[in-house]
Image (cartoon, rainbow, N blue to C red):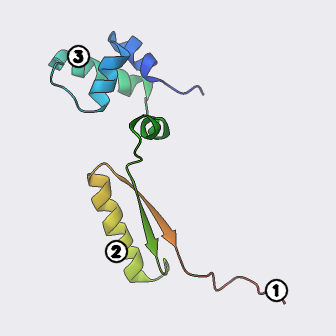
């Protein structure tokens, strides 16, 4: 399946790529309500998903936060990690959780 681009959304909505970019970045100052609705409908119809890697390269920021947990299997760590992840999600940030402990199941090589 071919990836849907901003250009595809712009064509479907009958607007420019610049307008799509402004919409995706929540800059609605010069955008009418009808235009917003057309863009939303085009995004939904085409199933458009922004390319976060491309966006982060363009903006020179990733909008990602790393969470390093001593033991991901510990209930407290799991609950705290989930709460942190939920908080960042509400802020439009992505959280990456990493486990820092050694795996006790690893076989030892002698």
Q: Which mark is residue 35?
A: 3
Q: Is residue 56 above or below residue 40?
A: below
Left/right placement of residue 40 relative to residue 30 reads right
Residue 40 in view in this figure: no
Q: Residue furthest right?
A: 110
* Circle 1: element type: loop
Q: Which mark is residue 76?
A: none
Q: Residue at x 30, y 48 (%)?
A: 92
According to the picture, the residue beneath numbered tag 2 turns out to be: 80
- Where is residue 40, by image quadrant? top left
Cα gap from disc 1 to disc 2, whole angstroms: 34 Å
Left/right placement of residue 25 relative to residue 28 reads right
Cα gap from disc 3 to disc 1, whole angstroms: 64 Å
Number of dots carrying numbers: 3
According to the picture, the residue beneath numbered tag 1 turns out to be: 109
**Residue 19 x %, y %:** 30, 18
- Nearest the viewer among 12 and 97 is 97
- Nearest the viewer among 71 and 59 is 59
């Amino acid at each position: 399946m071919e990836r849907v681009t901003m250009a595809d959304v712009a064509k479907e909505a009958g607007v420019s790529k610049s307008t799509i970019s402004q919409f995706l970045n929540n800059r609605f100052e010069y955008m009418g309500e009808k235009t917003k609705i057309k863009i939303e409908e085009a995004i939904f119809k085409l199933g458009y998903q922004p390319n976060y890697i491309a966006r982060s390269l363009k903006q020179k920021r990733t909008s990602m936060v790393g969470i390093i947990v001593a033991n991901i299997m510990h209930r407290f760590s799991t609950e705290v990690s989930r709460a942190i992840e939920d908080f960042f999600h509400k802020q439009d940030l992505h959280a990456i959780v990493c486990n820092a402990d050694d795996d006790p199941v690893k076989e030892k090589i002698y």
